Image: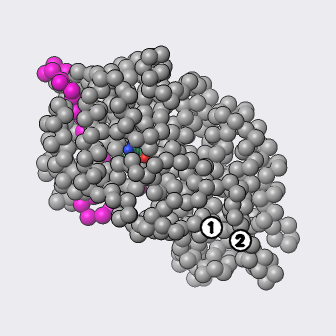
Amino acid sequence: MSDNLQMSFNLDGYSALGSPLPPEGYKGFAGFHKYWGKKPVEVWRFLIENLAEPHDIVLDPFLGSGLIAKECVGQNCRFIGFDINPISIELAKLYLRPPDYIDLGNAIFAFEKHLKPRINSMYQLSDGNIVTHFLWNNDQITRVWTKRGSRKVELNPTELELKGFQSAEEYQPKRLRKLQLFDNTRINSQKNLTIDTLFSPRALRAIDLIKSEIEQYSDNLKRALLLILSASVGQMSNMVFAVSKRGKTKGIETDKIEVGSWIVGYWCPTQHFEINAWNCYATKASKLLKAVAEARTSKKTPISSNPNDFFNEKETVCVQQGDAEQLLKDIPAESIKVILTDPPHGDRIPYLELSEMWNSILGLDYDYEDELVVSNAKERGKDIQSYNEKLSSIFSQCARVLKKNGIMAILFNARSECHWQSFRELEASIGLTFIGCYPSPYSAGSVLQDNRKGGLKTDYVLLFGKQINEKNREKTVETFRNIKNWTTRYPKESN
Ligand SMILES: C[S@@+](CC[C@H](N)C(=O)[O-])C[C@H]1O[C@@H](n2cnc3c(N)ncnc32)[C@H](O)[C@@H]1O
């Protein structure tokens, strides 16, 4: 079924005039921090341009990576967004109110001066060189890399050096809260997983040092420095796999080992790299600094976290952490012109479980109970039925807050027939009318793809209108009809 469906759409970008630009890939802020299920900004830009007028209010109850908030404000729209995941809100705030370029540069420079030598002292060889990478195999370091100038050099450390690096004393981090996970084989997590399984004592000590140094800063600069840390911890962890390649150098057979990356979940491969923690932080810091430089002229928008103030004081932007089902109740009826949203797609990504490493390192809290998700962690009781009920309740709230002739665009993808079916039922019950949909391709390798049986290779943008009159419906169809593979039928009915 799904294979036929994939075949029925040609996803080689778009051809027609007035179509969204094909995603360029994740650059600037969009490329700074991993976020599961992050969608290309071009997808949002196109929808905002075509559905909203300046000063309209746009709502997204499932903010995710937070990039949509910045796009809306950039197009002079007012924006209100929620997410249950606290790191999502931190990211949205970073993009809306980035720190001053000079302040961020100075802070990184100060870290380079004071913090780098302290962290690097844990990676120092007896000749003074600093280790950039350890390759571990079964609790043994098998290779050590360092640098001479910009050249990578592989070394054979002395027995004594190896012993020192391998037997780093256990370290109890002082500034990280405990991991709260569940038994979930799909993402390799266990209820009793502790942070010292994911990181070497050296990396934990480095993370603590970085956090303590960040303490002296405040507001949006502190937020940026902390998010640089969460953006870099994946590469600091024991979850960076090693890519083994058999190749030939000058006609001689060699085993080449390359550094992979932390991908998804909490899998610590037996053979993995341990990368110098300072280098990981510095790489992400320069990425953010560059993004801030590019965004230098952009407005620094005041951010409200109170929906009442947003509506009463006519503020520009409001982002709030919490359960959309509850928070939507604070939004007045018929107050929103456009809803653009991308809810969790059934059982595809357990966002909070996957983000727990970041949230524990940043000390951010939330309530797992309220997440909209289908999780393989049995203990959570997050099954398809409870997911459907919660999604219906959230969409009913969305329909309530939408103005007449307002449009709701939903990005969705589902493996199971019943998820699409529930959309149909929902449409009738909450008074929204389906207008049409089109496939929205990812940029290559950008998002965690669902390769399981039944998974579609692309999301769909589904458009619904509230009590939409014929004139407005036709106008909307006119705007989108040139998009390749636009259809007025549901995805599963199109083949
Ligand atoms: C598909 S992602 C959104 C991705 C986003 N469109 C982007 O481009 O990054 C869905 C989001 O819904 C959030 N979420 C799950 N349950 C929620 C709830 N009850 N209330 C608010 N947000 C929730 C997840 O934390 C996740 O960030």
Write the residue at 48% across / 67% down.
191
- Check disc 1 and report its element: helix, strand or loop: helix
Establish if 87 lies above or below 160. Answer: above
Q: How is the image coloured?
A: one colour
- Give the image quadrant in which the ligand numbered 1 is located: top left
Extreme-right residue of the structure: 127
* Residue identifier under label 2: 170
Rounded to the nearest angstrom, the CA distance separating label 1 from label 2 is 8 Å
Write the residue at 81% across / 57% down.
118
The region drawn magenta spans 446-472
The three-letter amino acid code for the residue at tag 1 is Asp
Let me know if residue 219 is in the magenta part: no
Image check: 409 left or right of 490? right
Residue 302, given in percent of the width and then of the height, sits at: 56, 24
* Residue identifier under label 1: 196
Establish if 117 lies above or below 335. Answer: below
Write the residue at 73% across / 38% down.
217
Residue 479, given in percent of the width and then of the height, sits at: 25, 27
The three-letter amino acid code for the residue at tag 2 is Glu
Quarter assignment of residue 40:
top left
Mark yes or no: residue 481 visible. Answer: no
Q: Nearer the viewer, residue 426 or 77?
A: 426
